[in-house]
Image (cartoon, rainbow, N blue to C red):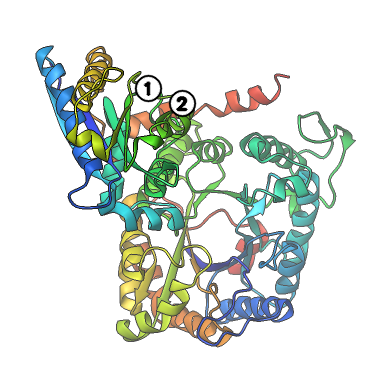
Amino acid sequence: MQFGIFTVGDVTTDPTTGRTPTEHERIKNTVAIALKAEEVGLDVFATGEHHNPPFVPSSPTTLLGHIAARTENLILSTSTTLITTNDPVKIAEDYATLQHLADGRIDLMTGRGNTGPVYPWFGQDIRQGIPLAIENYALLHRLWREDVVDWEGRFRTALQGFTSTPRPLDGVPPFVWHGSIRSPEIAEQAAYYGDGFFANHIFWPKQHTEKMVRLYRQRYAHYGHGTAEQAIVGLGGQVFMRKNSQDAVREFRPYFDNAPVYGHGPSLEEFTEQTPLTVGSPQQVIDRTLSFREYVGDYQRQLFLVDHAGLPLKTVLEQLDILGEEVVPVLRKEFANLRPAGVPATAPLHPAVRAQEA
Amino acid sequence: MQTLKLVAVSAGLSRPSSTRLLADRLAKATEERLTERGRPVEVQVVELRDLAVDIAKHLVSGFPSPALGSAIDAVTRADGVIAVTPVFTASYSGLFKSFFDLIDPDALSGSPVLLAATGGTARHSLALDHALRPLFAYLRALIVPTAVYAASEDWGSGGDEWTAGLPSRIDRAGTELADLMAGRQPEAPAQDVDEDVDTDADEVVPFERQLADLRLD
């Protein structure tokens, strides 16, 4: 099973000090966080993509290319790559280039994005979100698999005799996850292609995740890619840990109360009860994370959000130390023991990565 | 015969509240007319005051507390809804609107809804037609023709030569709602999320169809 972190890339004022990092600091800190993830033995680092303040990751492949050059084993991914507003031709080119530079250590997660104005900024219409996701991905899928593509669609200029370069490393396209919260169309899309399905999971009660994953698994089997149990599932998670759970709650509360997404709403206690957010001891995080498989089945990738809401770099790095030393080794063992034979332990890896691991 | 479900939503804030009183009277009138027609009915009152904080939290976080979730489910699955608000600043109250903002825009489509409002003076009675009717027209609810406005003075006076008194307006509105509800087949009991494995697949448009749809025009 793969464990890692995903970042939103928000520049948020630390509510305990009133200090706001500069964009430069946030970008450099993001790199430091990714390097730390590798150092403590995590498998995956994924970055969001945003095109408006207060977020910095507008150019994910630039960031990931830099991290690729400074790491050896970390798989670099996205959370998410905007399949709606990016030109699929540019996605094909950018991520194939990244795949070469990282010697196959990449995959990506497509998503629609939820910021209305981003669509018109890139010449698109948010009401066409789902059709854009479907058509753009259909083109991306072909660009990585066919050397010469003739294409005519609704949303972009037609292509005649087009070759996307570079071709994927050793002819193996990057693995793709489809990220969604509650759109059955996207679960269906992931199942149709036999791609991975990643449930955001973190801001809403588990019922959304449970339902979407179940649908994805059924349809994955329906399309003949394997059994429902063999479908490739990833989940988000959100944790804050200290040795003593009261300390974790006390320290995290001001960040929670002022967090951009859910701050000034439900209490920390209500939110931890109703969503997968876990604030407490490493053992509590282990127990909660193991409980996810009870409603999504045995899954392949768990990403944690640890660096948002204005948490200072030092704290984030401490969180990664705890994850790497105390949490993930136990989870690896427990999940491996519970996983039935025949259910893949990870999403498909590029042959170059498999060779390196062997 | 299956029991019909009638849900009265009251946005009254005081206790006791005339808004709640009006909701109860309307529910009772509707229940009596349905009983006369041999249709058993189960009445549930949703007091928005009790859910005010949960409603605000849902607006911020995007999901309901368990208590608010059951209230939303009750309204969504009702065979008939009575919606009663005090008139604040020439319109429905903010709490009333916030609750209906959290109802799925398609959930009340075709559902019989009786509108009612309370106020200190009869001068605001047209809020029913200027504010509440457009809101429920947007939700494509089947709005009962008679909407009931109760000003403070209505609780202590009969009708006059131009207008029937409050009791007869309540009775007329309840009869109209009962007529609409009596014509409905109660919905099958909602399935538990854990049991609807097979319906999941039915909800989704097969991918070939989604792709083909893009090629149509």
Which tag, 1 or 2, sits closer to the chain's start?
A: 2
Mark 1 to mark 2 CA distance (whole Å): 8 Å
According to the picture, the residue beneath numbered tag 1 turns out to be B143
Outermost residue, right side:
A161
- Total marks shown come to 2
Three-letter amino acid code at the position of disc 1: Ile
Same chain letter for marks 1 and 2: yes
Residue at (61%, 37%) from the top-left corner? A130
Q: Secondary structure at mark 1?
A: strand
Residue at (46%, 67%) from the top-left corner? A263
* Residue A172 in sight here: no
Question: Above or below — where is B118 with respect to A343?
Answer: above
Q: Estimate the x, y position of residue A206 in percent, counting from the top left.
A: 36, 53
Question: Above or below — where is A170 with respect to A38?
Answer: above
According to the picture, the residue beneath numbered tag 2 turns out to be B137
Q: Would you say the residues marked 1 and 2 are in contact, meaning their CB atoms lie under 8 Å apart?
A: yes
Q: Quadrant of residue B83?
A: top left
Question: Above or below — where is A19 with respect to A196?
Answer: below
Question: Above or below — where is A257 with respect to A15?
Answer: above
Q: Estimate the x, y position of residue B182 in percent, counting from the top left.
A: 22, 14
Q: Estimate the x, y position of residue A315 in percent, counting from the top left.
A: 51, 85
Q: Estimate the x, y position of residue B93 in percent, counting from the top left.
A: 39, 46
Q: Give left or right: position of B203 versus A35.
A: left
Outermost residue, front side:
B161
The chain identifier of the residue carrying mark 2 reads B
Comparing A251 with A166, the one in front is: A251
Q: Quadrant of the C terminus of chain A?
A: bottom right
Three-letter amino acid code at the position of disc 2: Ala
Comparing A250 with B26, the one in front is: B26
Q: Secondary structure at mark 2?
A: helix
Question: Within 10 angstroms of label 1, few (less than 14), some, or many (20 or more) residues?
Answer: many
Residue at (53%, 80%) from the top-left corner? A311
